[in-house]
Image: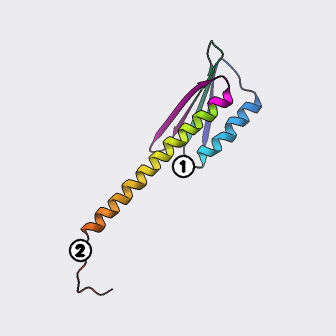
Amino acid sequence: MNTRFLLKGMTLDERTREYIEKRLTRIEKLIDPVSELEIEVDRDKKGKFRVEITVKTPHNLYRAEETTESVEGSTDMTIDELEAQIAKKKNKNRDLKLRGNRSIKKKLVVDEAARF
């Protein structure tokens, strides 16, 4: 998994970077190991932190952004939103597959003379 930090006009201390990486393990469990993660952190003029996380998988792109008073709060809210997006996509794919299986099963005709 490739992880890239983009910092605009600021630096992250080691403790904050470790916190973000620790929280990202929740996302890494849900996606392919080939995926790329981009974490963008910047601070606006009012002192609020904006955290944007983009997850690029081979077939999908997930993105979430949040602005709060702390980097940790923004990170938590962003990761929660990404988890919801990924879970929704996985459930949608699973449901479509099951629906297709049911459709094929309905169309299947078994001969009464067939022996099983």
How far is mark 1 from mark 2, CA to CA?
38 Å
Residue 58, horizontal then vertical, whole percent: 47, 44
Q: Secondary structure at mark 2?
A: loop
Q: Name the amino acid, label 2.
A: Val
Name which quarter of the figure residue 6 lies in: top right
Quadrant in which the N terminus appears: top right
Count numbered badges in the picture: 2
User: Which residue was labeled with disc 2?
Assistant: 109
Q: Residue at x 60, y 34 (%)?
A: 77
Please tell me whether residue 65 belongs to the stretch shown in magenta.
Answer: yes
Q: Residue at x 62, y 45 (%)?
A: 26
Kind of residue at disc 1:
Asp
Residue with the most extreme top position: 45
Dot 1 or dot 2, earlier in sequence: 1
Q: Eyeballing the image, is 35 above or below 47?
A: below
Give the residue drawn at x 45%, y 46%: 89
What is the secondary structure assignment of the residue under circle 1?
loop
- The answer to whether residue 53 is left or right of residue 115 is right
Q: Which residues are magenta?
A: 53-74
Residue 52 to residue 80: above or below: above
Within-10-Å neighbours for mark 1: few <14, some 14–19, many 20+: few
Q: Say whether residue 16 is left or right of residue 85.
A: right
Mark linked to residue 41 = none
Q: Position of residue 86 (x, y in %)?
A: 50, 44
Q: Give coordinates of residue 114: x percent, y percent.
A: 26, 85
Instruction: Identify the image quadrant of the C terminus.
Output: bottom left
On the image, which quarter does residue 40 sit in?
Answer: top right
Q: Position of residue 17 (x, y in %)?
A: 71, 33
Tell me the quarter of the picture where residue 115 sits. bottom left
Q: Which residue is mark 1?
A: 32
Look at 23% across and 87% down and name the residue there. Answer: 113
